[in-house]
Image (tube, coloured by chain):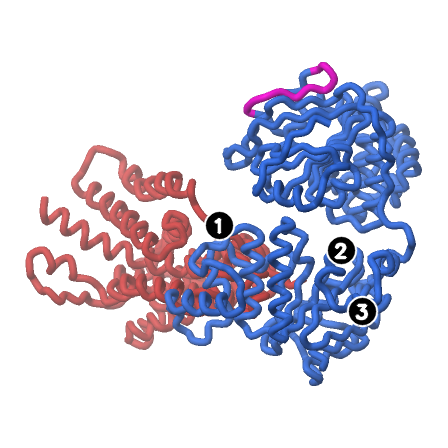
Amino acid sequence: MDTFLIGLMAATLRVATPLLMGTLGELFAERAGILNLGIEGTMFFGAFVGFVVGGVTGSLWLGVLAAVLAGMLSGLLMAFLSVRLGVNQHVSGLGITLLLTGLSLFGFRLFYGEPRIPPAIEPFSRLSPFGQTPVLGPLFDQYALTYIAFGLVPVVWWLLYRTSFGLQIRAVGENPEAADAAGVNVYVTRYLALCIAGGLMGAGGAFLSLAQLGAFTYGIIAGRGWVCIALVIFGNWDPVKVLWGALLFGGVFDLQLRLQIIGLQLPYETFLALPYLVTILALAVAGRNAAYPAALLKPYRRE
Amino acid sequence: MHAIQMRGITKRFGPVIANNHIDFDLMRGEIHALLGENGAGKTTLMRILYGLYHADEGEVRVNGQVAHVAAPKDAIQLGIGMVTQHFALVPTLSVAENVVLGYTGSFRVNPQVARQKVAEAAARFGVEVNPSALVRHLSVGERQRVEILKALYRNARVLILDEPTAVLVPQEVDMLFQTLERLRQDGLSVIFISHKLYEVMTVCDRITVLRDGHVVGTVDKAATSQAELARMMVGRETFGVARQERKPQGEVLLRIENLSAVDEKGLPAIKGVSLEVGAGEILGVAGVSGNGQTELSHVLAGTLKPTGGRVLVGDRDLTLADPAQVSGMGVGRIPEDRHEGAIGELNVAENLALEYLGEFITAGMLDHQRIRRHAEQLIAEYQIKASPTDRMRTLSGGNIQKVILARALSRNPQVVIASQPTRGLDVGATEYVRSKLLEQRSRGAAVLLLSEDLDEVLALSDRIAVIYEGRIVGLIPAKEADLEQLGLMMSGAREGIRVEA
């Protein structure tokens, strides 16, 4: 049972990694007042670009960097549409998801045709600082990107609550008129927030293709982007609370895999649905007191 | 020495000229009023000075130098600060965070250091605030002080205040005036936008009057009078409506007994309110916004169910009546938010018929001919500047209010509930609405007037009730009302004396 529990915990950290990256990204966007529904497509695009660049150059880290840049580009596009042009954020976000999903699939065919076995690369290997030490060993047997994702939580917190940039983001997402009157450039702040957000989403996608799978498949993101949006609400737009949400979802996701292996007499779809059911439940409970950023979804225009 | 010189400022919004070649001078160390009706162009001019709008023509000089103010950031750099009518504060941030926002100096922001700096600035300028409080927990007066401090913290030497007293109770107004006096002694210049003559004459050194986007003139306080300013402002001699004193009070038509109700959040908003309004009487309910007036008017209109108490019109119980029953029983309602009382996408004729659709049915169908004739008649009678087929949303605020007035009053209701009937209207429309309410009174209707505008309550009411935190804290005949006493009651400082007038 101990090994079961420790294995579950270790895997939870792994499964939570892309969620955490995506959620921290979405949190940046939403704190600045932009709901970025492009997250699902941006993660998919990040997974694809990371995989291609990693495969072509042979450097996985170059792949990650390319995925981050690709994500930032997607953030820029979102910013252009929703901040500059003031397009409805639902429309522009979903549009970006459709665009980037299509673009990635198209690119994939250009590069790889239609192989029967998905092309694979040698993924990142894990760091195991504690080697075979009983509990700590397996627990810390993680990818570098996982360490980075969890390390990002205090960094994001610090950026939001201890810097002028974070203060501006929080102000712009609550009351852009007030921020503008105080001399904050609302547009620049939102552009930057969306770029950072996109970069994090891209990295989250690249983790899946370059670390966890070592491959790129059509279903690689499988709704994780939407889960991230739910986790932002679950975490009440707070980077630390968001961490617990990612761990909870990661835990349930891995638990269902393990339950399938144990061989309970239930259709496997039941297990597959479990994480999403937990998300809905958690949202129903946490979402009731959700304190949405007041300017979310509202394009800002000086009169 | 000039702090600000604006020359030939012109600003157009489509076909409308909001500012037409305006010249405006501000000296160092003076409090200068910009006086004018709503829509005269005061706020537009100041928004140009602060970089929120860009002038189509004209030149701005700050301390004698030509200045290009493209954004508020530039204005701040030039030592200009603005406190707008709608406070530009972020409610979820602390006072200190709001003050330093956009002016942090370094990338790192240590909350403790920020609080300390803000506390020091507050002490230096004599503006009383608590740096660690969240803005959403502050009263309106406190928020305004945060705004002023915000400007001063950015080294403002020119402070623009856009109708700063509109939201304050009289005591807060006094405090504001003391602050301004102190700042003037420190050599700052203040631009005070207002349409209240009394205040302008109290606190300002010079007054520039705007009308329809033009400068009517600039006068020294010592050399002018309220009457002259009023004349300059509206371009005619008469100002305000005349109310005839009348003795008799007829039978009680509206009786509110121990009424209670909760607000949107489920918190008690009115707590045991009892009022009686007689035939031929206007009972004014004075109070600062948010003390239960909204909920009271909703209960009386039938759109909010009370949690206790009764509402009687004549001898009929309307406590739990729905809006249709309320209007059917002869209650005319002028809602607080006029956009709530009218449907923007429907035309004027349809809006006018809306409460009485049953009367316009012929053979089971709406009779558009009759709806239209009905509208034409009311449009003429109430001087509405619109045609029956105009969509409601294309009308100006004053005309929307006239449509609502026509609908509510054309049936000669026994009881009229008027909530903030002149809020946001210009002087002409305001006078019209007030004269119509007085007409209802002469006709013998019982009028309950809920208004945050103390001048309005004083001008129209026979008796004045003061509402504070959902309770009636005073009820006095209008003749005996004095401003200070009302102000104290409105701010909850003193329980009023109940006088049955």
Q: Which residue corresponds to mark 2?
A: B198
Please name the amino acid that badge 2 sits on.
Answer: Tyr
Q: Is residue B301 left or right of residue B371?
A: left
Image spot of residue B265 (x, y percent) = 51, 37
Q: Which mark is residue B137?
A: 1
Q: Is A19 left or right of B203, judged from the image as shown?
A: left
Q: Which is in the foreground here, disc 3 or disc 1?
A: 3
* In the rendered image, the vertical position of residue A80 relative to residue B38, given as above or below: below
Can residue B429 be seen from the camera position used here?
yes
The picture's colour for chain B is blue
What is the CA distance from the residue labelled 3 to the residue labelled 2?
A: 15 Å
Labels 2, 1: front one: 2
What residue is rendered at 54% in x and 72% in y?
Answer: B154
Q: Chain of mark 1?
A: B
Magenta segment: B307-316
Q: Which residue in the protein does label 3 denote?
A: B220
Kind of residue at disc 3: Asp
Above or below for B315 versus B409: above
